[in-house]
């Protein structure tokens, strides 16, 4: 499913952790194959991508979002 989401990027979990997009409503998406430029805390970003329902991860913090494009706001 294609989706466009605005939120903030945060590192979640323990150990190496995973990068996540957190919406203003509090929904968390685990980011798949995140570009290097997004591997930092960012207060506001708009991401267009696909929800990957065929992927399960160890972190289990939320649906997996595969990034197609993004814009730092």
Image (cartoon, helix red, strand yellow):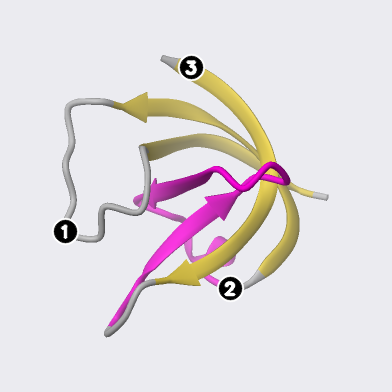
Specify the farthest residue to the bottom: 15
Q: Position of residue 59 (x, y in %)?
A: 25, 60
Asked if labels 3 and 2 touch by Cβ distance under 8 angstroms, the answer is: no
Query: Quick one: label 1 or label 3, which is nearer the N terminus?
Result: 3
Residue 36 lies left or right of residue 69; in this view the side is left
Crowd around label 2: few <14 · some 14–19 · many ≥20 (10 Å) = few
Q: Residue at x 44, y 63 (%)?
A: 19
Q: Is residue 32 above or below residue 65?
A: below
Q: Which residue is nearer to you in this view: 50 or 22?
A: 22
Query: Quick one: label 1 or label 2, which is nearer the N terminus?
Result: 2
Q: Label 1: which residue?
A: 58
Specify the farthest residue to the top: 1
Calculate the distance from the C-alpha at mark 2 to the C-alpha at mark 3.
24 Å
User: The N terminus appears in which quarter of the rendering?
Assistant: top left
Specify the farthest residue to the right: 73
Q: Is residue 63 above or below residue 16?
A: above
Q: Secondary structure at mark 1?
A: loop
Q: Position of residue 5 (x, y in %)?
A: 64, 33
User: Which is closer to the viewer, label 1 or label 2?
Assistant: 1
Q: Label 2: which residue?
A: 40
Q: Secondary structure at mark 3?
A: strand
Q: Residue at x 49, y 29 (%)?
A: 49
Asked which quadrant contains residue 51, the reply is: top left
Asked which quadrant contains residue 48, the reply is: top right
Numbered range of the magenta stretch: 16-40
Q: Label 3: which residue?
A: 2
């Amino acid at each position: 499913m294609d989706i466009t989401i605005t939120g903030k990027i945060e590192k979640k979990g323990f150990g190496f952790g995973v990068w996540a997009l957190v919406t203003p409503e509090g929904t968390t998406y685990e980011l798949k194959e995140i570009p290097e430029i997004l591997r930092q805390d960012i207060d506001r970003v708009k991401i267009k991508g696909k929800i990957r329902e065929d992927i399960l991860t160890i972190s289990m913090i939320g649906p997996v979002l595969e990034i197609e494009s993004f814009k730092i706001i």
